[in-house]
Amino acid sequence: HADLADYDLGENKWDGIISIFCPLPSSLRKQLYKKVEAGLKRNGVFLLEAYTPDQLKHGTGGGNSADVMQSKKSLSLELAGLKFKHLIELERDVREGIYHTGIGAVVQAIASKEI
């Protein structure tokens, strides 16, 4: 286990970094994403699925703060150093226990570091 606020991802160290439903305050997320960009090796891949702010209207999990949710726009801005190969917002059936079950508004991303 590690605290993402101060975890050192290093530089050019990772072939892949995955974030699946990791809600973080936007201020912390922006700092972490700078570390993600630096930490990925050339052609390294970042894979993500997260709730979008539209999730709030569903009430099927994900918390109650839009600040910890993401969108195509926020990902494009916060990970500007990566090239997106897949970036989509959609609604899908989420079945992850009693607190995360039902229609979920999500963003999915696959991006790579090309420099």
Image (cartoon, grey):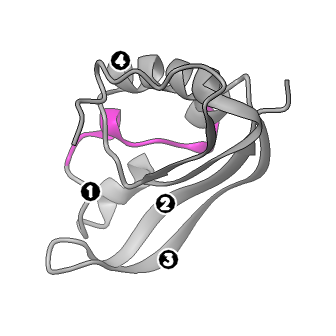
Q: Are marks 2 and 3 in contact (CB under 8 Å)?
A: yes
Describe the element under mark 4 as helix, strand or loop. Answer: helix
Please give the residue where the numbered disc 2 appears in the rendered image. 106
Residue type at mark 1 is: Gly
Q: What amino acid is labelled 2 in the image?
A: Val
Answer whether residue 15 is visible to the viewer in this image.
yes
Nearer to us of marks 4 and 3 is 4
Name the residue type under label 3. Arg
Q: Earlier in the sequence, mark 4 or mark 3?
A: 4
Q: Are marks 2 and 4 in contact (CB under 8 Å)?
A: no
Q: Of 28 and 13, which appears nearest the observer?
A: 13
**Residue at the right extreme, as displayed:** 115
Choose top left, top right, bottom left or bottom right for residue 76. Answer: top right
Q: CA distance from mark 2 to mark 4?
A: 20 Å
In the image, taking residue 42 as reference, residue 101 lies left or right, namely: left
Mark 2, residues whose alpha carbon is within 10 Å: few (<14), some, or many (≥20)?
Answer: many
Is 107 included in the stretch rendered in magenta? no
Up the image or down, 115 lies above or below 43; here it is: above
**Residue at which label 4 appears:** 27
Q: Residue at x 32, y 37 (%)?
A: 68
> Disc 3 marks which residue?
92
Q: Nearer the viewer, residue 23 or 43?
A: 43
The amino acid marked with disc number 4 is Ser
- CA distance separating discs 1 and 2: 10 Å
